[in-house]
Image: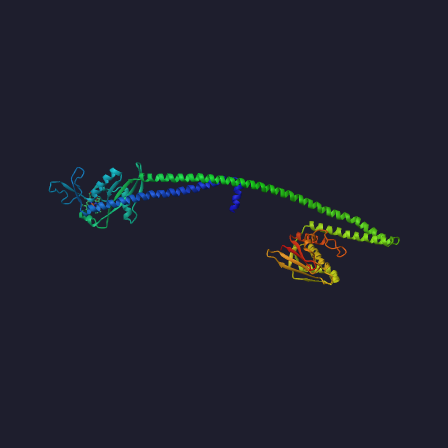
Amino acid sequence: MTECALQKYLARGSCRFLPLLLLALVVTVSAFLNYLNIRSHADQMALHYAEGLSQLLLSTRTWNAEHGGVYVPITDKDQPNPYLQIPHRDPVSEEGLRLTMINPAYMTRQIGEIARRQTGLVIHIFSRQPLNPLNAADPWELASLDHLEQGGKSWRLTLQHNPEGSVFRYMIPLQVEESCLTCHTRDGYQVGELRGGISLTFPADPHFAILRSQKMMMFFGHFLGFLVVGAVLTLLLNHLRQQWRAMEKVLSEQEKTIAQRTLKLERSNAELRDFAQIASHDLQEPLRTIVSFGNRLLLKHSAQLDDKGRDYLERIEKAATRMGHLIQDLLNYSRVASQEQRLTPVNLNELLSEVLDDLEQRRKECGGRVEIDPLGSVNGDRNLLHRLFLNLIGNALKFHRQGVRPLVRVSRTELDDGRVQILVEDNGIGFDEKYLDRIFRPFQRLHLRGQYPGTGMGLAICKKIVENHHGELYARSQPGEGTTFIMVLPL
Ligand code: HEC
């Protein structure tokens, strides 16, 4: 089927761009899949980055919490935290240095400020009911809290497209530890509880920039691949198409020549047939005249002739009779050759018993025996098959060896290719196989006329009949050892 489609494609030359289109489709799909793959790399890189940061942030917070807060000198930047309500918040050192306590949330904010300055990373600590209004959650932070509280397991990494540029947002959940309770017991914190989180917000562009060059390379590679493969494909198909056209031209020319020759052959065959028929017809007329006047001469005027004259006359008559037979056989031959066959199943055993009836006289004369195996039936023309077997068995009886009782056997074997093989074997005089070609040719005789009567047309007619049945007829023989005629017929 594909072969057929290809043939049509090559022959028609339409849909020329179909292969290129298909190629383009494949390349596009491949590029798209690659693009998705690179995209997911971007997300993964951002995730790794955020996870690393969150580890570090949580560690610093735990460090601070485990110290129950950390003291730093009070400066413009590091002012006491009004929301931190504990005793000894702002102690004075022995040297008179005024200190204040930095709680984890305060520290996180300060680290966040440094990070924002240096890398554009925004760190925001939040909760649902913040002590410090600065820690109020924005909608995304609330949503991610909801998500975690409802049992969502995944850390949320989101790509947000803001007017100032795309950012990744990542949420770090804050779980209450033992160390948190130093300050948060009052707020009702309990160990293991989710109290809020820290959100990381960082620009997505640097991540995408790294991947952009990868994408460019990938698209460029695909495009280049498409160009190269497309060019090769086009060249190849054009070449193939040209070859195909050339081949088709040669084929159609050949077909034309064959058709012309067949027509010529049919015409000359028909002419030959007509010629043979007309010729034999027309020849019979003068022949009859010769015979009848010869007869009259013999009957009425034989007294006037001497013995020599009568002998000449008898010879003329014999020759004329033989010529009559020859003409009749020629006519038969050309009829067999031109006849349209109507093939019907023919029971061969029935047919052969009729043939044997016809040959009864000859069989008795030579004391011969004919054995016939079960032969089944074949598809054929009854009359022609009758003539065929009449000729073959008749020949077998005729060409018997002196002093040997003729024995003829007709048998059947099935061939592997589904055809039937019918053998007519005899124990007659046989012939040298170098004459094999000759015996099937019209008017060919291997023996003197006086020895064995006949026109030499019998086997030629047989061969024609078998060929008309789309079969083959050939023979095997050894001089003095009998002959086997083998006919192979389709079933
Ligand atoms: C040294 C005291 C102290 C310790 C220890 C401490 N916190 Fe806080 N925390 C505070 C104070 C004070 C605030 C509010 C003021 C602020 O934003 O700095 C706060 C704010 C928060 C907030 C922001 C929400 C809000 O109410 O404003 C969260 C969440 C939080 N703390 C969680 C924790 C967790 C979890 C721990 C344990 C790892 C912890 N804290 C340890 C003092 C502390």
Camera-side residue: 342 or 47? 47
Classify residue 221 as left or right of residue 277. Answer: left
Which quadrant of the figure has residue 112? Answer: top left
Where's residue 25, x and y in %? Answer: 44, 41
Left or right relative to 410: residue 152: left
Confirm whether residue 17 shows in the render. Answer: no
Give how far across and how far down residue 134 sits, in percent. 22, 40
Above or below for 394 versus 77: below
User: Ligand 1 sits in which quadrant?
Assistant: top left
- Where, quadrant-wise, is the C terminus in this rendering? bottom right
Q: Which residue is pictured at 57% across the width and 41% down the height?
A: 248
* In the displayed structure image, the side of residue 120 where residue 9 appears, left or right: right
Above or below, 169 relative to 291: above
Q: Is residue 299 left or right of residue 397?
A: right
Residue sitting farthest toward the top? 164
Residue lying at the far right of the rendered structure: 304
Q: How many marks?
A: 0
Could you tell me residue 389's position as x and y percent? 69, 57
Q: Residue 254 location, x and y as percent?
A: 60, 42
